[in-house]
Amino acid sequence: DTAVSQTPKYLVTQMGNDKSIKCEQNLGHDTMYWYKQDSKKFLKIMFSYNNKELIINETVPNRFSPKSPDKAHLNLHINSLELGDSAVYFCASSRQEWGALETQYFGPGTRLLVL
Amino acid sequence: AQSVTQPDIHITVSEGASLELRCNYSYGATPYLFWYVQSPGQGLQLLLKYFSGDTLVQGIKGFEAEFKRSQSSFNLRKPSVHWSDAAEYFCAVVIHSSASKIIFGSGTRLSIRP
């Protein structure tokens, strides 16, 4: 069974479109994250949710809106896609107890290409 | 500003040879330190972490890392690499004053020569 899953795996779209990436974890974790990995492999946190509540928002443009319908899901919706949004987006989850000190479990990534 | 630096962008070693990947952090106190591995096309997986205590930490897949306070380093080592170790390796820190987010280094790509 996949612990952290993301859909779709690949996403190719035109500038200006709106798209969503879904993430689900079956580990029973309370905390979920979205990361962006650019073409140089630099990995940066975007959002962190704890029990459906936003904990971290790292100065991400308003075009990015995370949604957590329940603690097992954290979806990422992106409005008005721009060329610079092209990247690999990773979802991750962890237990809540020690926050960022907990081991994070990553999904396989969604490769977004904006044309 | 607090940061974590991986000075080597790409390293190639022969299969069976030893490996050391470098990681340096910039922070006044001892941070919490991690090594993650990203296999091609995959998400990251935790190899090991250091919080306190014994400065030599054992991880999965035969990896170990040593925390050296005097050098602000947390280098990853493996005595004998296997072809399956080819991957991207990320050092990461969580600083004490704000255990709310993890900061990743820029990564080191490891290639294995047959």
Image: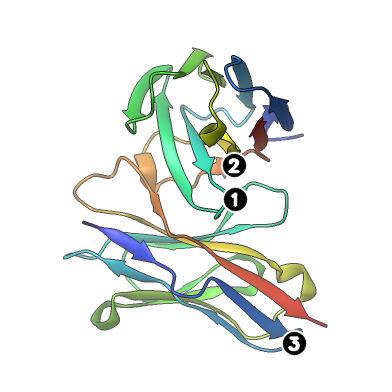
Marks 3 and 1, how far apart at CA: 24 Å
Report whether residue B95 is seen.
Answer: yes
Write down the residue under mark 1. Answer: B44
Q: Assess whether mark 2 and mark 3 are in contact (beta carbons under 8 angstroms).
A: no
What amino acid type should be assigned to the residue bearing mark 2? Phe
Left or right of A67, for residue B51: left
Give the total number of marks visible in the rendering.
3
Q: Which image quarter: residue B14?
A: bottom right
What amino acid type should be assigned to the residue bearing mark 3? Gly
Marks 3 and 2, how far apart at CA: 29 Å
Image position, residue B35 (x, y; %): 49, 62
Q: Quadrant of the C terminus of chain A?
A: top right
Residue A106 image label:
2
Image position, residue A51 (x, y; %): 42, 20
Residue B33 image label:
none
Q: Chain for mark 1?
A: B
Image position, residue B6 (x, y; %): 44, 69
Dot 2 alpha-carbon crowd within 10 angstroms: few under 14, some 14 to 19, many 20 or more: many
> Which label's residue is closer to the chain start, 3 or 1?
3
Write down the residue under mark 3. Answer: B16
Q: Which image quarter: residue A108?
A: top right
